Amino acid sequence: MNACSSSNTVATTHPATRSAAFTQQSAPDSSNSAAPTRLPLAGGSPDVTRRKFLASAGAAAVGLTILKPGLVAGAEANSKIDIGVIGCGGRGAWIAELLAKNGHYNVVGLADYFQDRVDEAGKKLNVPASKRFTGLSGYKRLLEEKVDAVAIESPPYFHPEQAAAAVEAGKHVYLAKPIAVDVPGCQSVGESGRKATEKRLAFQVDFQTRAMPSYQQVVSRIHNGGIGKLVTVYAEYQTSLMFEGRDAELRKNPSDPEVRLRSWGIDRTLSGDVITEQNIHALDVATWIVNANPIKAYGRGGRARPFLGDCWDHYSVLFFFPNDLMVTFTAKQVGFGFDDIMVRAHGETGSAETNYGGTCWLHSRDDAFTGKTDDIYLVGVQRNMVSFYENITKGDCSNPTVKPSVRSNLTTILGRTAAYTGTEVTWDQMLQAGEKWHFDPAGLKS
């Protein structure tokens, strides 16, 4: 029914599990360390957090008309995409509602490990019980249905397997960040993106920042020499204490594998740790600006919050890029009183800064730009849903979001590995080690 579809079947290959030079167990259970002093940001928005966006956007979603039909050019009025949603937790259920209200999608199937989640979402969206699938392999049954596309909103550990299966089944893929928790997973998603293009399928990674005009303007001007040669870049992801609810859930029965699965956000293996699962928003923008792979990284971090989960809650990492450029990265999910997702770049002739939910600006002797991103958490997703629909209906399967998403995801893993080991780690060492993380499904229903 859509211009991007193809009946060709191409086998999907996956990177083999390699011996790991850097192991998950190498991460020390670090004690608290002093937080760096932070100066106020020029044009920043320290009172804005993604968690606040979720609370406000979720409350407003029910009565919201998403975007005007005229914004979707070249699509027939009745050419709706039948889509299934894999992962129906908080964000997954929200994404499913936005898809249903978008006007260009029919949400026709749901998959989640937990019955209560698919039932709650299914009742809201009028998805029949026969199209709600549960268990670890529930997504496979969803892929057997007559759906054109799937949105993957499950814990990040499962993304590579589910994305590869979706492409193999001939479905278009709308994938949440981060794309993976380890190097083989990133490589698998990169391969799935390539296979999708080969099979004439759309494959989109949902980064809100990359969809926002203000971010696009700032980065484009930097790439066109708007601040001259880059001198230094700073990236930060600072929030107050987060995930208390998930810690409380885990404490109810920490030995229960289903409780662990519900609390995945504070589980290192399922989430990729905070630097990959959350902080990627800042590091994705930084690598977008620099437009290169880091050469090496050196860092530290640890745990200050008294959670049962094994994720760290603060990081400080130096990334070394070509041309003697350094990116200084810091992050925290602990404490109180300051919240911002910021990237600042200084060049030989000017400076620029992006703030998630705040101001994006660029100032130089020859150029100036200021733009807002106030509704980024919601509008960024809306724009990505429109792009996904347009790519499918217009037959554009170039899938340009995949490669930069692989790069930024690998960048977080490089910083994580350097911090865990307390040593300098190069990009090549990380790739050669090819560390694969393992989640034990014992006790969970298939």
Image (cartoon, grey):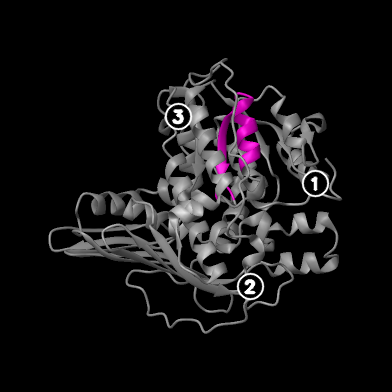
As drawn, the label of residue 28 is 2
Label 3 packing within 10 angstroms: few (<14), some (14-19), many (20+) = many
Asked if residue 172 is among those painted magenta in the image, a careful observer would answer: yes
Please give the name of the residue rendered at 32% of the width and 55% of the height, measured from the top-left corner.
290
Q: Nearer the viewer, residue 402 or 142?
A: 402
Residue type (three-letter) at the residue carrying disc 1: Phe
Q: Is residue 364 visible?
A: yes
Q: Nearer the viewer, mark 1 or mark 2?
A: 2
Please give the name of the residue rendered at 73% of the width and 38% of the height, measured from the top-left corner.
111
Q: Nearer the viewer, residue 157 or 55?
A: 157
Query: 382 left or right of 245?
Result: left
Query: 235 left or right of 62?
Result: left
Q: Nearer the viewer, residue 105 or 339?
A: 339
Q: Earlier in the sequence, mark 1 or mark 2?
A: 2
Q: Quadrant of the C terminus?
A: top right
Q: Which residues are magenta?
A: 160-180
Image coordinates of residue 303 in percent, x first then y, are 62, 75
Q: Secondary structure at mark 3?
A: helix
Label 2 packing within 10 angstroms: few (<14), some (14-19), many (20+) = some
